[in-house]
Image (cartoon, grey):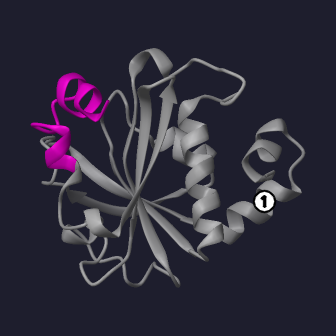
Amino acid sequence: MLDRVYKEELGWLQSAEEGLKDRYHGNSQYICAFDGFTPVGALRVVHDSAAGLPIEQFTDLRSLILGKAVELQRFAVVPEWRVRRVDDAPFGVGTALYRAALRLCAAENVETMVADVFLNTATTPIPFLRSMGFEQQPILFQDTELAHEGESSVMLARVRDILKLRQAGSRPLDRYLTEA
């Protein structure tokens, strides 16, 4: 699945193996969505460790991070599932993956979530992450980990703020993100 999106569609990796078996692999949790036995979406949650967060290769975030932190990365949904809705994912696979990451962070007392996002791509997750409670930071840098030459930016969210806002909300999406 990652080969299909990050290698074939976007050309950012030579192989999925290259994108996952790195120095952060041992401090990562993987969230996957399946259609039967076929993977249709994935998200990697990298926990802060002695290796730091992957984004810290490119920019210093220590002044922004509060408490335990994770980086959400390798967020990918195959094209035919990007707008598809099913009973288990009424707001789509991307939202279901994010929901699982948010729950994981809440269960593990993570305070800060960060994401490294390319600014000028057709598939940029910036609008989606904003709708989920992330805020774009005024930090621009060049991400050399993936084969893309455009600028990247930092997206940041506080887990407790997102949960508080969503739990107070009455929209179906708010309930979906916070109910067990």
Residue closest to the far top? 80
Q: In the image, is residue 37 above or below residue 111?
A: above
State the SS at label 1: helix
* Amino acid on which disc 1 is placed: Leu
Q: Position of residue 122 (x, y in %)?
A: 34, 27
Q: Is residue 122 left or right of residue 106?
A: left
Q: Position of residue 37 (x, y in %)?
A: 45, 25
Q: Name the residue at 55% across, 55% down.
A: 101
Question: Is residue 18 covered in magenta?
Answer: yes
Q: Residue 53 is drawn in which quadrant? A: bottom left
Q: Name the residue at 51% across, 22% down.
A: 36
Q: Name the residue at 43% across, 27% down.
A: 40
Question: Is residue 87 covered in magenta?
Answer: no
Count residues near mark 1 (Cα–Cα under 10 Å), then give few for <14, some for 14-19, many for 20+: few
Q: In the image, is residue 76 above or below residue 47?
A: above
Residue numbers of the magenta segment? 1-19
Q: Main secondary structure of the magenta part?
A: helix
